[in-house]
Amino acid sequence: NLDPSVQWSVGSFTVSDDWPIEDALPGRVWELESLGDPGFPDGTHLLQVIKTSGGNGQQLTVEVRRA
């Protein structure tokens, strides 16, 4: 109850030369900076990828939680 788990869905992750598919695999840790976004509190957040889904294209849906 003191530190509840927070989980977010990232609507779209685009695989590219700058962002390889390995960055979206479960277990990876992201450092996300947010400012003024209604869905993420302001600040820097360490997030761990817990689920990745998508087809054979370059668009993936990723779920993350606090690392």
Image: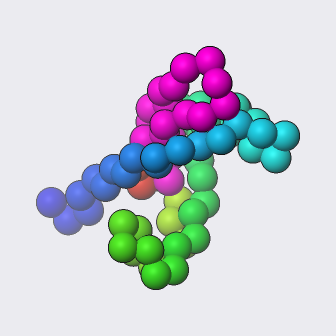
Query: Residue 43: in sight, yes or no?
Result: no
Q: Residue at x 48, y 27 (%)?
A: 53
- Horizontal side of 7 relative to 54 (left or right) equals left
- Horizontal side of 53 relative to 21 (left or right) equals left
Q: Residue at x 23, y 58 (%)?
A: 4
x, y percent for residue 15: 70, 37
- Report the front residue among 55 and 52: 55
- Horizontal side of 8 relative to 17 (left or right) equals left
Query: Residue 66: in sight, yes or no?
Result: yes
Name the quadrant containing residue 66: bottom left
x, y percent for residue 20: 75, 36
- Report the front residue among 7 and 17: 17
Examine the structure image and report whether residue 62 is included in the region drawn in magenta.
yes
Examine the structure image and report whether residue 54 is included in the region drawn in magenta.
yes
Instruction: Answer above or below: position of 46 versus 44.
Output: above
Q: Residue at x 58, y 70 (%)?
A: 33
How many numbered marks does the figure carry?
0
Instruction: Answer above or below: position of 10 versus 61.
Output: below
Q: What's the magenta region?
A: 47-63
- Report the front residue among 12 and 32: 12
| Magenta residues, dominant SS class | strand
Q: Residue at x 36, y 73 (%)?
A: 38
